[in-house]
Amino acid sequence: MIKSMTAYGKGDYLQDGKRFLVELKSLNNRYRDVVLRLPKNLQGLEKELRDLIDSKIKRGRVEVFFQIETTQEAPPYKLELNLPLVDAYLNIFDQLSSRSKLNQEPRLETLLQMNDVVIVRTDVENEEKMGKALSRALSMGLDSLIEMRKKEGAAIEIDLKKRLEKISGFVEEVRGRTSKIVEAYQVRLKENVERLRQEIVVDADRIAQEVAIFAERSDITEELVRMASHVEQFETYLEINDVVGRRLDFLIQEMNREVNTLGSKSSDGKVSRIVVEMKAELEKLREQVQNVE
């Protein structure tokens, strides 16, 4: 079963009067790209949470948003002033005031807006408990995200199989035209020779040789066999419970090469029209595969 890379998930876990909320959004990406939006005081938990995501998501861009809400009256954070930094800022203000000869005192709100003036403290025991709670919420969010990825993947799989069926039908149509292409060339060649019979000497062996050369140059048996094999391999990948997006993308590239060769070798109008239709279906396949994990 394939999975889509586009999905949404949410986790909600309660512990010690706090609600730990996690929202996840995933988008298609050639590689795995995880972006965590953690509260500043919990940056130390990033590796643990990232490892959990990496264990379940193999491909795609995943944006994860964490939020902690409290139902208790006590403030959820312990705040402290970074006094050495405050003193350094005040010293800079004094220097600026002296140099510019502007007698102006710094405002409190200005100081509070300076980076790292206010420190958010969390004791180790509390951080460990919060880490476990966030991991639980994240696991719930990942489960819902993966479930949505599976549902989206199932819809994509149905569409892919329909298009593969069309392509297989086109391959069989072209296969049915292969003998007729040589026959049609032989008829055209004989008609041309008949028109020129009064002006040149016709060599039957030469005509047979030209027909044989044309048959060899326009032989598309190998391309048709490889196309059928690629379609079969594509269908096999759809049944594998693994990350197959890149493999499917590679197969589509190979199928495009075979179809281009079919078009270049064939001088038959009907085959040329079928080739155009096959290219259109392959492009639609490629667009869908871009969303497959």
Image: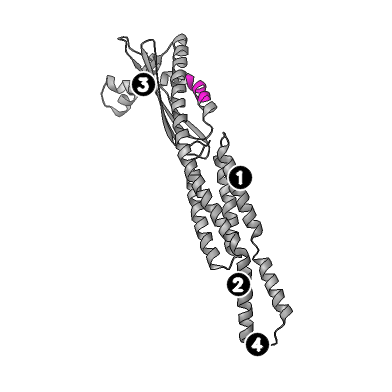
Which residue is pictured at 60% across the width and 53% down the height?
Answer: 227
Which residue is pictured at 49% across the width and 55% down the height?
Answer: 280
Above or below: residue 88 compared with residue 285: above
Per the rendered image, the range of residues in magenta is: 45-52
Q: Which residue is mark 3?
A: 89
For marks 4 and 3, give the one nearer the viewer: 4
Answer with mark 3 or mark 1, whichever residue precedes in sequence.
3
Main structural element of the magenta stretch: helix, strand or loop? Answer: helix
Answer with mark 2 or mark 3, whichever residue precedes in sequence.
3
Tell me which amino acid carries mark 4: Arg
Badge 2, how many Cα within 10 Å: few under 14, some, many 20+? few
> Distance of mark 1 from mark 4, alpha carbons?
52 Å
Residue closer to the observer: 189 or 114:
189
Mark 1 secondary-structure assignment: helix
Q: Which residue is mark 2?
A: 184
> Is residue 62 among what the camera can see?
yes
Above or below: residue 200 compared with residue 176: below
Mark 2 secondary-structure assignment: helix
Residue closer to the observer: 29 or 136:
136
Instruction: Report how many numbered discs are placed on residues in the image.
Output: 4
Tell me which amino acid carries mark 2: Ala
Q: Which residue is mark 4?
A: 197
Q: Which residue is mark 1?
A: 233
Q: Position of residue 164 (x, y in %)?
A: 53, 49
Tell me which amino acid carries mark 1: Gln
> Distance of mark 2 from mark 1, alpha carbons?
34 Å
> Distance of mark 4 from mark 2, alpha carbons?
20 Å
Answer with mark 2 or mark 1, whichever residue precedes in sequence.
2
